Image: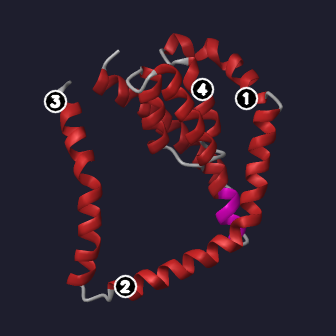
């Protein structure tokens, strides 16, 4: 394992404990009442969750129809000849295509990828890093813009798609840099 991989592993091992202790510690240092602030935030989050349910149902139905109709498999087969010379495994393409639409769908595809190719395969590593480096772009646009009543996206979609592509490209480059091949 390279030095960079060891450093990243050490950072990832300590990130969650530092956040779990650091955030309440920072709030206490700022004299914020942590528990009432947490409860108020949870209440607000629950209200937002009820408001976005219709948008969530719409986007999940669209993703299900896209996959169920076979469009996902067909699109993957069309893109495979283009990406293979770049060293991008074809098996990770469905994950790249579903991730902007559905986080849970992408998690299911990542689990299938890890199960079929192994957790240390190039495709699984790229898929795992891409899942963390990208966003459910169209889900976010539909749900959150819908929740606040924004109907004209203007530059949001091109910017979001560009950010998604940058996250995927960075994932591939970082996995190749850290884990080789």
Q: Position of residue 11 (x, y in %)?
A: 22, 46
- How far apart are labels 2 and 3 at the CA level? 40 Å
Return the disc, 4 or 1, that comes first in the chain's sequence: 1
The residue that mark 1 highlights is 72
Q: How is the image coloured?
A: secondary structure
The residue that mark 3 highlights is 3
The residue that mark 2 highlights is 35
Horizontal relation, residue 169 to residue 33: left or right:
right
- How far apart are labels 4 and 2 at the CA level? 43 Å
Q: Give the residues drawn in magenta, as a range.
A: 141-148
Label 3's element?
A: helix
4 and 2 marks in contact (CB < 8 Å): no
3 and 4 marks in contact (CB < 8 Å): no
- How far apart are labels 2 and 1 at the CA level? 45 Å
Label 2's element?
A: helix
Q: Quadrant of the N terminus?
A: top left
Return the disc, 2 or 3, that comes first in the chain's sequence: 3
Return the disc, 3 or 4, that comes first in the chain's sequence: 3
Q: Residue furthest front?
A: 115
Residue 145 lies in the magenta-colored region: yes
Asked whether the viewer can see residue 155, the reply is: no
Q: Main secondary structure of the magenta part?
A: helix
2 and 1 marks in contact (CB < 8 Å): no
Name the residue located 56 percent from the left edge and 30 percent from the top edge. Answer: 112
1 and 3 marks in contact (CB < 8 Å): no
Q: Quadrant of the C terminus?
A: top left
**Mark 4 crowd level (few <14, some 14–19, many ≥20, 10 Å Cα):** many
Q: Which of the two marks, 2 or 3, is nearer to us in this view?
A: 2
2 and 3 marks in contact (CB < 8 Å): no
**Mark drawn on residue 93:** 4
Above or below, 148 relative to 114? below
Horizontal relation, residue 172 to residue 49: left or right:
left
């Amino acid at each position: 394992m390279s030095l960079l991989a060891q450093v990243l592993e050490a950072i990832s091992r300590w990130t969650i404990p530092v956040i779990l202790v650091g955030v309440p510690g920072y709030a206490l240092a700022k004299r914020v009442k942590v528990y009432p602030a947490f409860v108020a935030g949870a209440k607000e989050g629950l209200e937002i969750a009820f408001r976005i349910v219709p948008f969530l149902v719409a986007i999940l139905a669209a993703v299900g129809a896209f996959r169920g109709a076979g469009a996902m498999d067909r699109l993957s087969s069309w893109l495979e000849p283009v990406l293979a010379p770049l060293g991008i495994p074809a098996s990770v393409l469905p994950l790249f295509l579903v991730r902007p639409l559905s986080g849970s769908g992408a998690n299911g595809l990542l689990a299938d990828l890890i199960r079929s190719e192994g957790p240390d395969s190039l495709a699984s590593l790229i898929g795992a890093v891409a899942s963390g480096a990208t966003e459910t772009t169209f889900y976010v646009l539909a749900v959150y813009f819908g929740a606040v009543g924004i109907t004209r996206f203007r530059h949001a979609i091109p910017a979001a798609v560009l950010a998604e592509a940058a996250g995927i490209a960075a994932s591939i480059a970082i996995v190749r840099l850290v884990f080789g091949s």
